[in-house]
Amino acid sequence: MRIGLVCPYSLDVAGGVQNHVRDLAETLVAAGHGVSVLAPVSEGDDVAELPPYVVSAGRAVSVPYNGSVARVAFGPVAAARTRRWLRAGGFDVVHVHEPMAPSVALIALAASNAPVVATFHTATERSRAMAAAAGILRPALDKIVGRIAVSQLALQTVVQHLGGSAVIVPNGLFVERFAAQRAARFDDGGTPTIVFLGRFDEPRKGLPVLLAALGGVLAEYPGARLVVAGQGDVDAAAGRLSGPTRAAVSFVGALDDHARARLLADADVFVAPNLGGESFGIVLIEAMAAGAPVVASDIPAFTAVCEHGRLAAQFTNGDADDLTRAVLETLADPETPARADAATTAVWRYDWSTVTRQVTAVYDAVTAGSALDSLLADGPR
């Protein structure tokens, strides 16, 4: 099958949607499909460093979107490149991601003559702005013949703003890449290592809550350390710390998959203090796959992944004192290893070997002109 994937955000910048598109492309290629990915590219970057299946839609520019900053491409150049890509591709199906984002996914949706599948990654509460945008974009959105939502929360966003329904297919992970690092776990003499992953200067990622909770952890474990991995202004973040907290925190920057998996495997506790704006929780899946005990805020997206506390401890969103409690209980609880083992087993359902089959089931249905009713009722198999 000839498949055209469209990523609205610059592929050379780390992000959940970008990682999803890249990994999906890799698994589709490995399965023997012909794949091309259209995406923005940041100015000055060497396109040759991107995978050969990536086609540049033009220079990426930064815009505020969903509580973050997205690097997108829109305008005459992006439109011309998108139409050229569609003509040259001869695709059996075009799969756009985040079709309502102001970027090339929306352009491809409007211009495609092939059947269009769209994946909705965002969970957004009912908003007048999105409702108005949905009305304006209705002619283009009506071209979507196969809708995918990455979670129940993302599905609710689709239903609230667009009507109808969607097939739930979760985000994927190469689970073995993380699970293989479990053997690397070491005993450091009882000094716990706490890990945070994410763009730490984005308020919604919640690092200030974790830093506020760290003092209580250090009172019980004076040798504890917090490792912060991800993009952000290290000097600004470190400058706001003082005393024992400053000495306990290390910033290691953005990590590749292997280094991230190793860090998670070494963690005594992985903490996800995110405040909101999440539709899934791939970072939790990564930690669970690596065998790290997880403590997560009780936002709905994380509660679903944690199975309401069965697979991980949770704390009241934004409450530093409750986060301290959850971390200390996790470190002291003799059942923590068993819960981490159960989580590692559970996350295999998110492995790309399963998720890709679910996605291609949608492709098969739309290219055959079949209804998605059975997939909506039971989920892809």
Image (cartoon, rainbow, N blue to C red):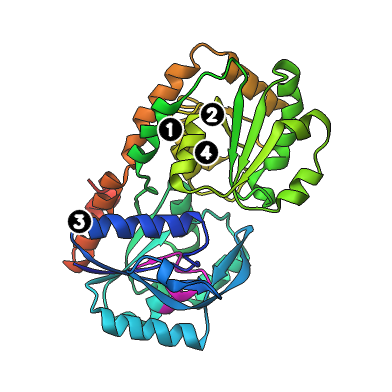
Per the rendered image, the range of residues in magenta is 95-107
Q: Secondary structure at mark 4?
A: helix
Q: Is residue 320 above or below residue 125?
A: above
Q: Nearer the viewer, residue 281 or 129?
A: 281
Quadrant of residue 299 within the rendered picture: top right
Cα separation between marks 2 and 4: 19 Å
Q: Residue at x 50, y 42 (%)?
A: 283
Q: Is residue 376 above or below residue 83?
A: above
Q: Which residue is mark 3?
A: 31
Q: Earlier in the sequence, mark 2 or mark 4?
A: 2
Quadrant of residue 194 within the rendered picture: top right
Q: Earlier in the sequence, mark 3 or mark 2?
A: 3
Cα separation between marks 3 and 4: 31 Å
Q: Earlier in the sequence, mark 1 or mark 2?
A: 2
Cα separation between marks 3 and 1: 26 Å
Q: Earlier in the sequence, mark 3 or mark 1?
A: 3
Query: Do residues under tags 1 and 2 come within 8 Å of each other at their CB atoms?
Result: yes
Instruction: Find residue 302 and name its label.
Output: 4
Query: Do residues under tags 3 and 4 come within 8 Å of each other at their CB atoms?
Result: no
In which quadrant of the rendered image does the N terminus lie? Answer: bottom left
Q: Residue furthest top?
A: 334
Q: Which residue is mark 1?
A: 290
Q: Earlier in the sequence, mark 3 or mark 4?
A: 3
Cα separation between marks 1 and 2: 9 Å
